[in-house]
Image (cartoon, helix red, strand yellow):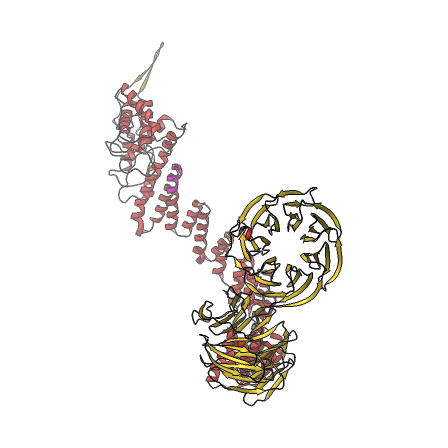
Amino acid sequence: MRAVLTWRDKAEQCVYDLAFKPDGTQLILAAGNRLLVYDTSDGTLLQPLKGHKDTVYCVAYAKDGKRFASGSADKSVIIWTSKLEGILKYTHNDSIQCVSYNPVTHQLASCSSSDFGLWSPEQKSVSKHKSSSKITCCSWTNDGQYLALGMFSGVISIRNRNGEEKVKIERPGGSLSPLWSICWSPSREEHNDILAVADWGQKLSFYQLSGKQIGKDRSLNFDPCCLSYFTKGEYILLGGSDKQVSLFTKDGVRLGTVGEQNSWVWTCKVKPDSNYVVVGCQDGTISFYQLIFSTVHGLYKDRYAYRDSMTDVIVQHLITEQKVRIKCKELVKKIAIYKNRLAIQLPEKILIYELYSDDSLDMRYRVKEKIVRKFECNLLVVCADHIILCQEKRLQCLSFSGVKEREWQMESLIRYIKVIGGPPGREGLLVGLKNGQILKIFVDSLFAIVLLKQATAVRCLDMSASRNKLAVVDENDTCLVYDIHTKELLFQEPNANSVAWNTQCEDMLCFSGGGYLNIKASTFPVHQQKLQGFVVGYNGSRIFCLHAFSMSAVEVPQSAPMYQYLDRKMFREAYQIACLGVTDTDWRELAMEALEGLEFETAKKAFTRVQDLRYLELINSIEERKKRGETNNDLFLADVFSYQGKFHEAARLYKRSGHENLALDMYTDLRMFEYAKDFLGSGDPKETKMLITKQADWARNINEPKAAVEMYISAGEHSKAIEISGDHGWVDTLIDIARKLDKAEREPLLMCAHYFKKLDNPGYAAETYLKIGDLKSLVHLHVDTQRWDEAFALGEKHPEFKDDIYVPYAQWLAENDRFEEAQKAFHKAGRQGEAVRVLEQLTHNAVVESRFNDAAYYYWMLSMQCLDIAQDPAQKDVMLGKFHHFQHLAELYHGYHAIQRYTEEPFSFHLPETLFNISRFLLHSLTKDTPLGISKVNTLFTLAKQSKALGAYKLARHAYDKLQGLQTPARFQKSIELGSLTIRSKPFQDSEELVPLCYRCSTNNPLLNNLGNVCINCRQPFVFSASSYEVLHLVEFYLEEGITDEEAVSLIDLEAPRHKRENKWQEIASNTSQTLRLDETLDSMGDDDPFTAKLSFEGICEVGRAGQMSPLEG
């Protein structure tokens, strides 16, 4: 740190206080009984201000820059505007010792020997508060909430904005350590408000707002008269009886002297937001200094160590951006870093640190050695086991224990020194002197080796990675590059202030100067780009640049030198440069150039970097072909050009190498059909057709189907044209194609028909099928489109398609709930099994849904179907059995329909006699298994009710008894119980009128017949009426063998012969009367049974099986 005097002036009286205008343009001084206003830029006295009658002790400027205040021994405070006009004046009872503006509310605190006052522009009066001791200094906190008052008694009183005391700090020294200056830290980084206190006990102390002391008191060895912070709170200025201003850290560590004076320093302040300091003295001297903080730093490869806050060292990893702070708590004078070593020179010692581990990313340092001795040196260098001190012309080598091992005396001043590496304890140093000599020194050798000598002084040095070249920047800002072995000057470049070789590439260096960064590769021209600062290192694509006080790693693409190598077809060297760091575009360009130059190894590496698998596959295929013995570079280059999109060049190379087919394939694959046609010329028609087909394929792929269809048709690819037209629903196009095609082209026509059918144009499909004579497909078309009339007409002409028509028709009818029609259609199609299954399903559904009348009808139809099938001798017996079974079920369900309606519906449509007959019929028929859906309870319930109503009490009682043993529905329960009781009041007999008669043997049968519906005497089955279920006057008989059904019918139709009867009436007449007399003598034939008579006439003696019945006569 250096203090440079900018200007100086001298007032006639002591300068007790001063204040800067917040923008830093003006300086207000309290000198004698006047205020002096200076221009800070050049020290010009702008205007003296008179208003006080006695010595002015204090002055303060409001933070908004609108007004300032001054306090004097005349007990008054004057408020001045920024235009240097006094606007207000108020007084205290004693002389004014200090004034301070609130930084937020701009409230003014003015303190005298006995009290302090608070004034703000909004108030008409000043609120004053008594003080127990003389107030010597005051300061507001950053947020303007609290005011600290320093007392002559050594007490610190902290008040709020209303003047109320919140904290009182009583210091150990008491009145023996009167406070003379206090100041709150303006730092925004601190979590707590920190108050710096300087007392005449010659101590510097720090306190928190709560009153707690921070750290210990720091001895000053002089009486402090003034204390002030830098704008951001990083440093403290102290001046007093030692006649100088000292710079301290914010923690109270003394850093150095700003400026020595001839008398006591009463006031010192820092210009806002700058490094300028103004000092006011007892003898009236005003000095304005600029503080220059020099950069103390060290660099080794990617580790950069630099001084921060004057007492800390920060080590920064330039690649990972990691930082570590080492707090030394003393002024850091020099820093050196090398590999895992770090040396820090403090005023009274040198600390040597080492890394915890050998990890290149480790940032943890620990103290290895301490050399407790004061050293004066210009430069400091650290090695693995030594430190090197540079003092003007002399170099000293010390061990880490502080023992001097070696010393070198130079001919001239040492301007530059750098460690260039080497084994531990034998490192080499590169030294540049003012007389132009460049030396190499090994720390274990007494002898310095002169590398070369030039005419101008050395400013900067660096050696290439292989130690073959040396770059020097001289005092004329020229960069000179030498060959170390031959001492030959290889080249030189102007406008350089620093230089660095690339540690990863022997032929690359960079130098900075004039606001530009210059990169030079080999002997190529320099590439420039803008860069502020000094180049201090060059590693790969990173250039380490020191600008102002910060070090940064700048990522610099190595594109320019790479292209310089590419221009000369030096692919391997270009690849080495690219490895240092270039953009993906540059890598791709390198890969392409190497590929065109047939430098496949370099191209492969470059394409691998950009992860271009396509080109890597190409290179791999070319290498495989070379292994197989191919040597035609034109063919390889043609493949490269085709991949790069240089198709015409590729085609020319293909043709030159005798592979025209590859050029043609390339053009067609790329859909460049016009170029392909031009390349083909008037060639083979097959090739032309193939080209058109490929063009059509491409048009199809790019979603231009119309063009594709036209091309396919012109190429004769009708199937593809039909497919596209069909997929897009272009019926007109399909019609044109179908009508133009010959009937022999069956496949395309079938495709047309398929799409016509799919697009709901069955007429065109039928036309197409007829054209190729495919009747079966036509039938299927009619069936699929449900054009049944056309299908039936076609079936009439071609019976062989009967099954193909009627079976789908029946299925369609069944799907549309037209089951009866479906059954007939199955029957018509000869699918008896299907027909029977449909009827069985219909009957089952009818029974489940309690549609017993429909069930009866379906069972009757089933029996008729079985009768038709029984005509087949192989199935006769089975089908006849099924016929009788289904007939029986049809009769049962037909009868039960009435029972079900009677029991379920509120009204009955049948007479009681009919219901009585039906229930008896069902009861007699259900002697074994009960079919699905028929309820025995319902049947017995109906029988009981109707028997009771018709007078068949015995039968009714039996029915009720039967019901008692069955599970009956709740709705019948009451009726059954009541009926069971009331029936017992009736006679235990049945009405004679209800007793059935057998018309064969004239036997009266009981109402409850255990044999069922047959006569108990002759076993003749009763034949019932289908409506009233009364026994019909019919008997069943059997034909003798040899009598056919036709003969039996004719015999039945004959009239039975009748014997002539004599007139048995006699009429006797007289005169008075007329008498008729009946003769009782009858012919024996007159009493014959007419039925028996007819039987005898027909000559039937034995019963044979027949199905014909005839009504009885008489």
| Residue 219 position in % (x across, y down) | 53, 60
Q: In this rendering, would 739 be left or right of 934?
A: right
Residue farthest to the bottom, as pictured:
486
Residue 845 is a magenta residue: yes
Q: Quadrant of residue 222?
A: bottom right
Placement of the N terminus among the 4 image quadrants: bottom right
Q: Main secondary structure of the magenta part?
A: helix
Left or right position of 89 against 398: right
Q: Nearer the viewer, residue 452 or 158?
A: 158
- Number of numbered discs: 0
Which quadrant of the rendered structure holds the C terminus?
Answer: top left
- Tell whether position 645 is magenta: no
Left-right relation of 1031 to 703? left
Task: Give the answer, above or below, for where 434 lies relative to 204.
Answer: below
Q: Which range is magenta?
A: 843-854
Q: Position of residue 1059 (x, y in %)?
A: 30, 29
